[in-house]
Amino acid sequence: MRYSEQFMEHIEYAFHAFCKIVLRHEAMNAWRDLKRKESREISLDYLMSERYFEPSAMDSYFEKQDKPTVFIVSGMEVIVDDERLATSLSKLPELRREVLLLYYFVGYRDEAIGRQYGRCRSTINHRRNVALKQLRKEWEKLKHEEQKVDTF
């Protein structure tokens, strides 16, 4: 079936009109989005001129009064900032403490810790779980003692 020249011209004009409508609506959407963004955002220059503030932040890991506790595990230093956690960890047997520190602070997996101590993965997993239970008990004891001291 062959279309007439007049019909083909009509389709071309209709397509052009459709494209113009789509472009106009997209332009309106873009302007609307810019206006919405402009109404919700504040310029950094404006904020800096209104009042002085530091546009950055500094981490304050070791600014506390307490000194961090350092544990040496496999030749690596592991720094524990929380005093109660450090005290609880120091009350654990050395092997259990090392397994916990290697797993949670250094990021070793059970297989790597097992290779280091000549044990299988499941043994290290069991020791880690036992160490966590013991650590939880020590933590609760310290928490209870602190509450006792606070009430006197």
Image: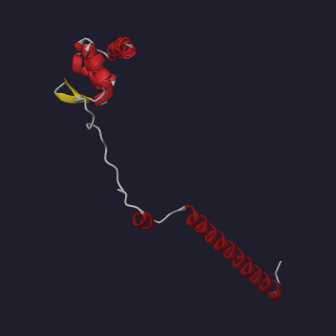
Query: Residue 56 location, x and y as percent?
Result: 35, 54
Q: Quadrant of the C terminus?
A: top left
Query: Residue 136 location, x and y as percent?
Result: 38, 15
Residue 42 shown left or right of residue 24 in the figure:
left
Residue 120 shown left or right of residue 31 in the figure:
left
Q: State whether residue 111 is above or below residue 95.
A: below
Residue 108 appears in the picture as rendered = no
Q: Looking at the image, which residue is at 82% across and 81% down? A: 2
Front residue of this view, candidates 56 and 23: 56
Q: Looking at the image, which residue is at 34% across and 16% down? A: 128
Residue 45 shown left or right of residue 1 in the figure:
left
Q: Quadrant of the N terminus?
A: bottom right
- Taking the view exactly as shown, the residue that stands out farthest to the front is 152
Query: Residue 149 location, x and y as percent?
Result: 35, 14
Residue 101, quarter of the rendered image: top left
Front residue of this view, candidates 73 and 115: 73
Q: Looking at the image, which residue is at 25% across and 32% down? A: 65
Residue 148 appears in the picture as rendered = yes
